[in-house]
Image (cartoon, helix red, strand yellow):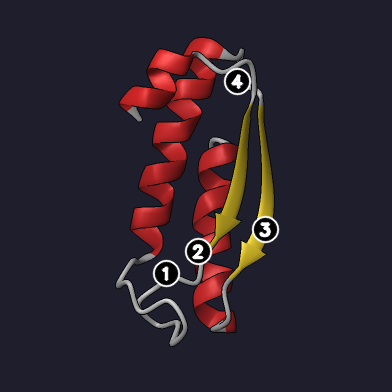
């Protein structure tokens, strides 16, 4: 995030992959929904400071459908201020 702050982007593009979830056998990184919400909020904060809140988020991956659904919901809730 510090490097992103230094860069001062005009727009942020998020390649939103969710296969690092603890329930996803492929990523095996141990993240949970709150982790995805946390990083989304950090990126949103940067966008609000430097790019008038402009964010594009594209779904990239996640292979455990239940974990994917929960993680995407957490991500979208932050983006939508829900």
Mark 2 touches mark 4? (CB < 8 Å):
no
Residue 8 percent coordinates (x, y) = 50, 13
Marks 4/1: CA distance? Answer: 26 Å
Toward the viewer: 43 or 6? Answer: 6
Q: Nearer the viewer, mark 4 or mark 1?
A: 1
- Secondary structure beneath dot 2 equals helix
- Which of pointers 3 and 1 lies earlier in the amino acid sequence? 1
Mark 2 neighbour class, 10 Å CA radius: few under 14, some 14 to 19, many 20 or more: many
- Secondary structure beneath dot 4 equals loop
Q: In the rendered image of this protein, does residue 27 appear above or below residue 40?
A: below
Mark 1 neighbour class, 10 Å CA radius: few under 14, some 14 to 19, many 20 or more: many
Toward the viewer: 6 or 47? Answer: 6
- Secondary structure beneath dot 3 equals strand
- Which of pointers 3 and 4 lies earlier in the amino acid sequence? 4
Q: Which residue is mark 1?
A: 20
Residue 11 percent coordinates (x, y) = 64, 23
- Secondary structure beneath dot 1 equals loop
Residue 79 percent coordinates (x, y) = 57, 39
Query: Residue 53: which numbered mark, if any?
Result: 4
- Which of pointers 2 and 4 lies earlier in the amino acid sequence? 4
Q: Which residue is mark 2?
A: 71
Query: Residue 64: which numbered mark, if any?
Result: none
Marks 3/4: CA distance? Answer: 19 Å
Residue 37 in the figure: left or right of residue 47: left
At a point 43% along the width and 37% down the height, the residue shown is 41
How many numbered marks are there? 4
Marks 3/1: CA distance? Answer: 13 Å
Query: Residue 59: which numbered mark, if any?
Result: 3
Residue 31 in the figure: left or right of residue 63: left
Residue 30 in the figure: left or right of residue 64: left
- Which of pointers 4 and 1 lies earlier in the amino acid sequence? 1
Toward the viewer: 33 or 30? Answer: 30
């Amino acid at each position: 995030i510090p490097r992103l702050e230094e860069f001062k982007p005009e727009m942020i593009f998020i390649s939103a992959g969710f296969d690092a979830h603890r329930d996803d056998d492929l990523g095996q990184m141990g993240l949970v929904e709150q982790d995805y919400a946390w990083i989304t909020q950090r990126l949103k904060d940067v966008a609000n400071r430097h790019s008038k809140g402009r964010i594009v988020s594209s779904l990239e991956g996640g292979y455990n459908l239940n974990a994917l659904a929960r993680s995407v919901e957490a991500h979208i809730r932050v983006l939508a201020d829900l």
